Amino acid sequence: MKRCRLVFLTALLLSTLAAAQSAQPVPKKHSSGTSAKTAASPKMTNDDCLACHSDPTLTKDENGKPVSLHVDDAKFKNSVHSIYGCTDCHTGIKAYPHDPTPAKPVCATCHADQQAAYDHGIHAKAAAAGNTNVAKCQDCHGSVHEILPPSDPKSKVARANIPQTCGACHGQKFVMASGGMSSAPFTSYQQSVHGKAVAAGSDKAAVCTDCHGEHDILSATDPKSPINKFNVPATCGKCHSNIQQEYVKSIHGQAIARGNWQAPVCTDCHGIHTIKAPNDPNSTVASANVQNTCASCHGSVKLSNEFGVPGGRVASYLSSYHGMAEKVGSTTVANCASCHGVHNILPPGDPHSTVNHANLAKTCGQCHPGANDKFITSKVHLDGTAKADFGSKVIAFISRMYIWMIVVVIGGMVLHNLIVFRKKLILHRIGQPRILFRMTLGQRIQHLALLTSFFTLVLTGFALHYPSSWLAVIFVNELVRSYVHRIAGVVLIAVSLFHLWYVIKTPNGRRLIKDMLPDWKDIADARDAFRYYLGYSENRPMFGRFTYSEKMEYWALVWGMFVMAATGLMAWFKVGVGERVPGWWIDVAITIHWYEAVLATLAIIVWHLYGVMFDPDAYPMNWSWYDGKMSIEHYEHEHPLDMGAIEKAAGSTGEEAEPDKTVADEHEEKAGSHK
């Protein structure tokens, strides 16, 4: 009975609804052509949207570029936004087709606090200034339909992935260059102790957001920025709290608290993105590098001039045993941190300072067991200057006494030996009958001009390349040095041009070129010389007017003259040359000029001076460069095949021959050979 009653009531209700529906008037069509059914349709579901947007080929044109409108349903369901429907964000969409085109959803609708923080950061300010490469929400968090929570290891903002997320922009040179920045910090971070730890799986090592913040990233010059110099200790202290507590009590931490921006903070000693472990040899706080790190401040006179900090601390340390041992590679010798501490550095007057007089014995005892009050009276910073205490005055007196003693004693020895050497040179020169003319007066003048200009160029050139050496001091200043160098260069070129005229126009010059031409005998002579001097042969090779080594030297000189003159003129007149050739040509010329100068200098010292001075057959000197003469015995020993010169000298009285009466060789001696 009850069941029949229920069926009757249900039928009555349905008939009533049907009658009401039939009684309603038929609505008119919309002008747009959309049916009444569409206008009155319920809120669109995700399935309605995915009916089109699940198509991977669905795109739209935006600024001439196709933009994908595809939504991956599987990824969307795993995202943090999966609890919302499409129209919760795309509120302007009521039906299909979307006419007009709906506005893009704004993240700030739900994330107002994060958007407000972002608007204060450097990314938003750069975007406002017109930089189109600035990171926005989706650049960091990923596609809005695929955003994963930070706790998900696959999320772009998961802790382990943050360096790579930031590196997507900050690791790209062209992106950073558009904002006037460099990609080097990201590369440096990857090689740092933090970057390597994160890459190895650490969830505690610092990532970008730990130091720079998240949405409200500020410039280092902003007082509110966590990387502003005055905020760096607190920023590092979020992970290194114990060290921060030591630092804030130190002399450096107290100076920062007073607003002294010249005091060092964590990044001044450890680096910024390049921070490495202390046991890494490349770390700025590695044992071998500590003195250089401290010297960046304490080696400057600025601390003395502005804050009254005693100067010369680094130099005096380097003068001590500790400093010298450290420079030769000791890894156990005391450095700055060994005595003064690391993060807990305090002034000597502070009772807690490791270098306070009351604590010195304990500090020194770390390396010198048994150190007592007498031991600590010795100086660590050994500068040898007069101080108030008696020991320092004695050290200063002894230092000055020995400096003068060294100057007087060694100077006297040098003077004595020079006097003896000079007399022996004279006796050697006049003690042998030297009647064979090896060089004429004109040739000797060319040689002297070449010698003088060459060594002037060497000294002035090396003075520029080594500005801290004594060479730079002797030329007073750069203006003087540059003028002397150019004058010497002009003289060298002039001598070379004269020599070119000499070998073309004069008989002796033409004979010189003929005798200097290499031939097959030179190769055999070089082979036989090595066999003889190495003891494999008893027969010494017989040389003519010029040996193979003299020919090599002459043609090397000719080659070097062309190279040095050409590259030197390019460097001198770089503006004019730069108008005709690419700029890098001048850089190449300067490089060639330098290395050719080094090569030529070493060749003269090792090759030429040996033959003239240090060869036992010529020692202490072959005087032909001075007066043109050699003894017949010496010349016959060196050049036995030059019989013409030997026979002519044998009948000579040793007087300089009359010069040939020709215009081209007006000042040349008639007899002899030319070296």
Image: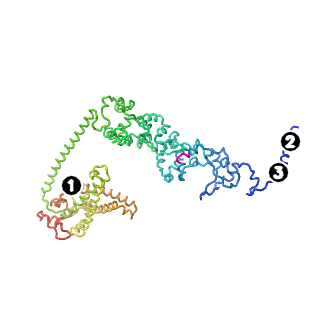
Q: Quadrant of residue 406?
A: top left
Can you identify the residue that label 3 sits on? 24
Badge 3: how crowded within 10 Å, few (<14), some, or many (20+)?
few
Foreground tag (2 vs 1)? 2
Q: Answer with mark 2 or mark 1, whichever residue precedes in sequence.
A: 2
Q: Answer with mark 2 or mark 3, whichever residue precedes in sequence.
A: 2
Residue extending farthest to the right is 1
Q: Main secondary structure of the magenta part?
A: helix
Q: Is residue 326 magenta?
A: no
* Residue 521 drawn above or below residue 384: below
Q: Secondary structure at mark 1?
A: helix
Q: Amino acid at mark 1?
A: Met
Can you identify the residue that label 2 sits on? 9
Badge 2: how crowded within 10 Å, few (<14), some, or many (20+)?
few
Q: Nearer the viewer, residue 416 or 91?
A: 91
Percent of width and height locating residue 428: 14, 54
Q: Which residues are magenta?
A: 118-123
Q: Quadrant of the C terminus?
A: bottom left
Q: Amino acid at mark 3?
A: Gln
Q: Is residue 76 left or right of residue 189?
A: right
Q: Quadrant of residue 537?
A: bottom left
